[in-house]
Image (cartoon, rainbow, N blue to C red):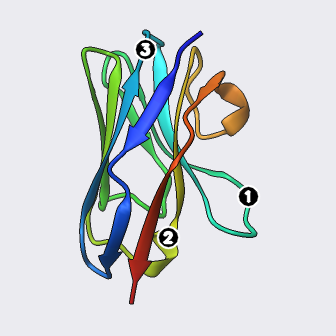
């Protein structure tokens, strides 16, 4: 069992930046960030392997950067934020990478990101 705890969410204006963090209690090969806006399905934002290979959703490429240290702690640097980035952001961990939520076994409770225009 791996426990995940997110932090770093908040409210910013359009064009602002936030850095999300996720502390994991154990090691998994793949970690990722997902988000879910009210009334919408959960969508994959970015994932990263233990070796540092990354993958991003088209909607965040060039604006968000995923990273991890000690193969356990996970981060998401979000720049040039837009109102459509507003969502609850979740940290996820598992053995298989990908931007589909079904690939992940462990989930955090989420941290809210709100971007105002």
The residue carrying mark 2 is 86
Taking depth in this image into account, of 81 and 18 the one nearest to the observer is 18
In depth, the one of 65 and 23 nearer the eye is: 23
In the figure, residue 15 lies in which quadrant? bottom left
Q: Name the quarter where the N terminus is drawn.
A: top right
* Residue at x 67%, y 27% (from the top left corner): 103
Q: Where's residue 104, x and y in %?
A: 64, 26
Q: Secondary structure at mark 3?
A: loop
User: Image point 32% across, 50% down: which residue?
Assistant: 8
Report if the CB atoms under discs 1 and 2 are less than 8 Å apart.
no
The label nearer to you, 3 versus 1, is 3
Look at mark 3 in the image and give the residue it sits on: 25
- On the rendered structure, is 41 left or right of 72? right
Q: Residue furthest bottom?
A: 117
The disc at residue 41 is 1
Residue at 37% over, 16% down: 50
Q: Is residue 104 left or right of residue 7?
A: right
């Amino acid at each position: 069992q791996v426990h995940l705890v997110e932090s770093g969410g908040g409210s910013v204006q359009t064009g602002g930046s936030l850095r999300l963090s996720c502390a994991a209690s154990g090691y998994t090969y793949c970690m990722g960030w997902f988000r879910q806006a009210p009334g919408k399905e959960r969508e994959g934002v970015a994932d990263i392997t233990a070796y540092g290979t990354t993958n991003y959703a088209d909607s965040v490429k060039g604006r968000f950067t995923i990273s991890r240290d000690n193969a356990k702690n996970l981060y998401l640097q979000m720049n040039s934020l837009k109102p459509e980035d507003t969502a609850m952001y979740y940290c996820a961990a598992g053995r298989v990478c990908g931007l589909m939520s079904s690939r992940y076994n462990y989930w955090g409770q989420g941290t809210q990101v709100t971007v105002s225009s």
